[in-house]
Each structure stands twice: as structure tokens, then as C-alpha cells.
């Protein structure tokens, strides 16, 4: 028997089969729920087919050999709605009775997972390795957002298309939490080459600063306690464990950076992602290559950056693992700086489920990379345990 995959939303609805008293006696068998799932998926494939003729549909799926089967499909769809529950509450948007939390970029998904654990289903929207500044959510994200119980985004105008889609589809009582906007005040906004003040968009990369990530975690905790007060004890425990690890990490990072000569704690990167980090740890961000329009720098921009690097004596420049930059490599060659091309902005190391696939793993990778290239000793940080403090069952789109 060929199994037809169903979406997580359909899984959630089918998981409620047998719990609705109106249909309990009929839908209590697993085979029935599987039939419903399969037929709904076939209906989806029919509706989205590039060929809108029923004739093509019946020819494409031999198991549906004639049009009369469509009547059965319609019947099953009606029963699927019944399986979702008839009381009109938000039960249909839960998996195994859990809340549905939607996030955006992978670092935020990971931070949320450390606070929430497995008490809620967590689904990220932005695929890892994607330019989160220009990401346009697919139409299917509207359905996911319409069933969410909480949405956490970075804010600071990082995910404007996703924010707009959320505002258009969320239920009225669902919180949309912009973590960055609630972590710092406007007078703390950082502006730079990639995020000039003239464009009106501050640098949104707060998650590269561990001290600010603790505020993110607290905000996530407070929101979840409001939405799910019965889970307060779990959220309290998880938050305390995560904050303790971040504090330990911060100490290890500080000690590691002390091994880098003060006059070499300078950053030139492809993308301006370390403004808040630099302010906390006393680094100097000399410049970046990627301009505000996320295109290529002008010849004048390149010349100016070369002059800055030479004047500042920058020992290394850092490219992006996700966005290779021949321009930055050329700048390194022109100035004699070491070129390192594997810093990560929001693409977590490893694969989902692996120990280093976490916000801690991301920061450890980047800070070790920076330290080694700038003449420091990263051995004290390289051995830091970056495993999550809570169970991470979040969905990280790839």
C-alpha cells in the first residue's frame, strides 16, 4: 500500500478523530482516519493540478477510476471537518493537544525551543540558508499562521512580508511578539553600512549578542505563561536552565576574546550582523560589503572599504557561508588580510536533531572562527557544550 503524505495540520485534525462524540462510534478505527487523510490529500492534488479537467485527474490517479469517486471524496472531507472538533475553539490548531508556536529565523526558533521545550509544537517559517531580509513566505504559510496560538518574530523590520502575512491571518486573540522591538529602545538602535539610518531600518541582528538573547528568552517565557498558564512551571524551569547556560557561555566568550590582541578585535564582514555584539564585547566594526539594498557594493564603496582596512590594520575579513562574495575575497587580496568565508548569520551548524544545531552552536562556531582568524586562542570556547537545555522538537525548514 502506498502511503500518501499529509500535512501537519491535517495530522492534527485527524489526531482528534474519535474524540468528537458525534462521530466517535464510526471514526474510532485507525483505518478510517487513514482513509480520510489519503482522500483529502488526493483532493488537494486535484485542486492544485495544472490541468483543471476531471478527465485528466481520473487518468492521473488510477486508484480513482471514475468520477463517481469524487462524491466519496466530498463525503470524507466533511467527516474530516467533524474529526477536527465541532465546538469552534482553537483545538484544531493543536497537535496532540499542544499549542502551535510559529517562529521565523532559525536562531529564534532555537531560543524558543529552549524555553518552551516539548510543551508546544514549534514551527519555523524561514528556511535556513535563506536571506531572511528578502524572504517571501509561501502562500501555504497563511494557513499555518491562521492556526497559530503564538507567533514570535525578530522584528526591527527584519521580516516585514512575514509580519504582514501574520497580521492578515492570525486570529484576533493571538499574540504577535516582535522580540527585537521589545528588547531595545529606539535610542539603542544601531545603524551602519548595511542598515543606514537614512533607510529607516535599524540593524536587526540582536541574536549575535548573548546578553540580548537572554531578554529574548525572558519575553518568550512571559508570553507563553500568559497564553498557557498551566505550563508556567515548565517554562520557569526551562528559562532558568537556559539563562544559566547563556551566562556560562558569556563567561567563556569573554575569556576567549581576552586572548585576542586588543588592536585586532576588528570586524569586516560581508553583512553587518555584529553591531550589538561589538558594543557588548568592545569590538570595532570597521565595515561591511553588502549595502542596504542587499546587492553588490559600488566601486566607490569597495575603494573606501579597502582604505579603511589598510588604515585600521584589519588582520582578517569574514565572508558568509551562505552568501559567497568574490568582492570581499578580492578586497582581502588587495589588503593582504586573511579571508575567512564561513561565518553564519542565521544558518545553524549541523542538521536538525544534532547537538550543535542550536543558537549556542551557531554563536560558538562564529566566535571560534573569529578568534582563530584574529590571532586568539579559541581552545577554551571550542569545548563548550552547546546542547540545548530543553528538548528541541521544533521544525526547522531547510
Image (cartoon, rainbow, N blue to C red):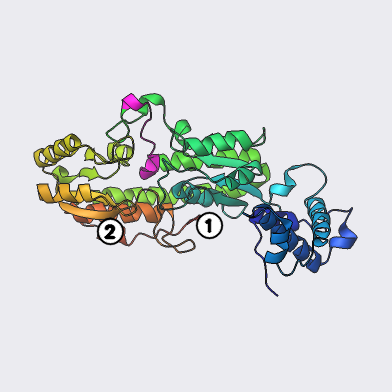
Whether 214 is among the magenta residues is no
Q: Position of residue 326 (x, y in %)?
A: 22, 51
The residue where tag 1 is placed is 392
Whether 201 is among the magenta residues is yes
Is residue 122 toward the left or the right of residue 98 in the image?
left
Q: Which residues are magenta?
A: 197-211
Q: Is residue 258 in view from this perspective?
A: no
What residue is at 66 percent from the left and 57 percent from the top?
45
The residue where tag 2 is placed is 380
Q: Could you give the CA–CA distance between mark 2 and mark 1, rounded to whole angstroms?
A: 26 Å
Residue 269 vs residue 356, the one in the foreground: 269
User: Which quarter of the rendered picture does the N terminus lie within?
Assistant: bottom right
Label 1, residues with CA under 10 Å away: few <14, some 14-19, many ≥20? many
What residue is at 73 percent from the left and 54 percent from the top?
13
Residue 81 vs residue 372, the one in the foreground: 81
Examine the rendered structure and indicate whether residue 208 appears above or below residue 54.
above
Amino acid at each position: 500500500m502506498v502511503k500518501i503524505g499529509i500535512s501537519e495540520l491535517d495530522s492534527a485534525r485527524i489526531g482528534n478523530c474519535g474524540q468528537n462524540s458525534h462521530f466517535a462510534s464510526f471514526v474510532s478505527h485507525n483505518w478510517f482516519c487513514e482513509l480520510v487523510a489519503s482522500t483529502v490529500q488526493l483532493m488537494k492534488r486535484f485542486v492544485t493540478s495544472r490541468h483543471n479537467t476531471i478527465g485528466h485527474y481520473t487518468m492521473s490517479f488510477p486508484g480513482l477510476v471514475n468520477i463517481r469517486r469524487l462524491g466519496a471524496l466530498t463525503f470524507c472531507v466533511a467527516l474530516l471537518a467533524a474529526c477536527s472538533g465541532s465546538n469552534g475553539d482553537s483545538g484544531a490548531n493543536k497537535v496532540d493537544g499542544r499549542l502551535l508556536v510559529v517562529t521565523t529565523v532559525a536562531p529564534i526558533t532555537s531560543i524558543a525551543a529552549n524555553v518552551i521545550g516539548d510543551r508546544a509544537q514549534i514551527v519555523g517559517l524561514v528556511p535556513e540558508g535563506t536571506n531572511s531580509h528578502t524572504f517571501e513566505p509561501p502562500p501555504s504559510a497563511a494557513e499555518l499562521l491562521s492556526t497559530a496560538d503564538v507567533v514570535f518574530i525578530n522584528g526591527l523590520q527584519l521580516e516585514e512580508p512575514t509580519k504582514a502575512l501574520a497580521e492578515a491571518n492570525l486570529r484576533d486573540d493571538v499574540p504577535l511578539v516582535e522580540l527585537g522591538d521589545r528588547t531595545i529602545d529606539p535610542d539603542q538602535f544601531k545603524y551602519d553600512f548595511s542598515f543606514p539610518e537614512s533607510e529607516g531600518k535599524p540593524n536587526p541582528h540582536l541574536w549575535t549578542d548573548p546578553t540580548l538573547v537572554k531578554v529574548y528568552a525572558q519575553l518568550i517565557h512571559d508570553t507563553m505563561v500568559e497564553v498557557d498558564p498551566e505550563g508556567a512551571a515548565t517554562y520557569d524551569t526551562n528559562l532558568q536552565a537556559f539563562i544559566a547556560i547563556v551566562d556560562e557561555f558569556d563567561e567563556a566568550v569573554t575569556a576567549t576574546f581576552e586572548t585576542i590582541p586588543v588592536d585586532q578585535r576588528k570586524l569586516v564582514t560581508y553583512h553587518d550582523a555584529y553591531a550589538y555584539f561589538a558594543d557588548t564585547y568592545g569590538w570595532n566594526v570597521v565595515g561591511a560589503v553588502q549595502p542596504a539594498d542587499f546587492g553588490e557594493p559600488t566601486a566607490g564603496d569597495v575603494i573606501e572599504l579597502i582604505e579603511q582596512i589598510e588604515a585600521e590594520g584589519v588582520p582578517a575579513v569574514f565572508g558568509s557561508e551562505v552568501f559567497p562574495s568574490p568582492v570581499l575575497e578580492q578586497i582581502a587580496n588587495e589588503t593582504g588580510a586573511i579571508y575567512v568565508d564561513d561565518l553564519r548569520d542565521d544558518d545553524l551548524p549541523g542538521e536538525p536533531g544534532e547537538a550543535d544545531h542550536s543558537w549556542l552552536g551557531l554563536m560558538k562556531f562564529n566566535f571560534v572562527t573569529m578568534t582563530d582568524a584574529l590571532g586568539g586562542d579559541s581552545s577554551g570556547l571550542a569545548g563548550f557544550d552547546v546542547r540545548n537545555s530543553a528538548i528541541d522538537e521544533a521544525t526547522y525548514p531547510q
